[in-house]
Image (spheres, rainbow, N blue to C red):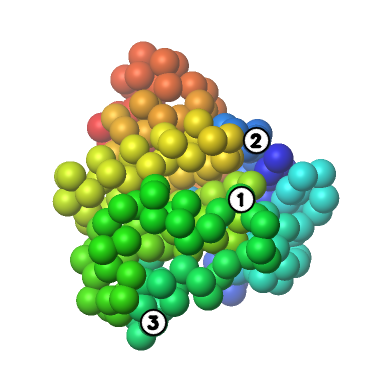
Amino acid sequence: MLEVVDLHAGYGDAPVLFGVGFGVARGEVVTLLGRNGMGKTTTVRAVMGLIRPRGGAVRFAGDRIDGMPPHRIARRGIGLVPEGRQVFPNLTTRENLIATAARAGGAWSLDRVLSLFPRLAERLDSMAALLSGGEQQMLAIGRALMTDPCLLILDEATEGLAPLIREDIWRALAQLKQAGLGILLIDKNLNALMRIADRHVVLEKGRAVWTGDSAALRADQALARRYLGV
């Protein structure tokens, strides 16, 4: 579904990505792993059109999307949950969700999002700025789902959240996987990632240096220490 081929990108005169390549199939969960500053967020930004790639290709459902503006990429069926959540603070929970809703008849409705995150149903009329960090993250995921995506990208899915809220997020992501949604996921909680992911891509200084499944990653402690610091 998503195919990233020999991707090069950066900021100004500073290159960050040097030929990154990976793919995400329909219904598959793939993680981007690596220490801070290795190129994970830059990869997401290049895929979503928030920065223009300097080389390589990004294909979605067989079509080239690199170079497209972000709103057109989103309409193709990619939903982004950005680092820092970035909800609309002066809108209510309900308004945040409705603001991004796809046309009627899509797979995701307000009721379906609220069934995935019942906590949001209790805060529908609350301003997003007044929600807790965990509630804002649920809202950010729900907002992305309301665009009716085929692929969901989450940058730092549970960063800074309380343990109980993290478990709520992981349960929701497992349900989304079971429903057939493709997911590209960045997070530092390696144990949780290995429970849900089909494959992992490790980035080091802007290059994909290892790809494998959770069993292979769990078995290779030297790799985890070298590239992930665990």
Category of crowding for the residue at label 3, using alpha-carbon neighbours closer than 10 angstroms: few (below 14), some (14–19), many (at least 20): some
**177 with respect to 7 (left or right):** left
Q: Spatial distance from mark 2 to mark 1, Cα to Cα?
A: 15 Å
**Image: 180 above or below 55:** above
Under mark 2, the amino acid is Arg
Q: Point out the tag, 3 or 2, that comes first from the N-terminus.
A: 2
Under mark 3, the amino acid is Leu
Q: Secondary structure at mark 3?
A: loop
Q: Spatial distance from mark 1 to mark 3, Cα to Cα?
A: 24 Å
Q: Nearer the viewer, residue 225 or 101?
A: 101
**Image: 67 above or below 127:** above
**183 with respect to 53 (left or right):** left
**Residue under the image location 81 percent in, 44 percent down:** 62
Residue 91, disc: 3
Q: Residue furthest right?
A: 63
Quadrant position of residue 138: bottom left
Q: Point out the tag, 1 or 3, that comes first from the N-terminus.
A: 3
**Residue under the image location 31 percent in, 33 percent down:** 192
Residue 37's x, y, as percent? 40, 55
Residue 208's x, y, as percent? 55, 38
Please name the residue that numbered disc 1 is placed on.
Answer: 107
Residue 185, disc: none
Please name the residue that numbered disc 2 is placed on.
Answer: 26
**Image: 212 above or below 131:** above
**Residue under the image location 54 percent in, 35 percent down:** 179
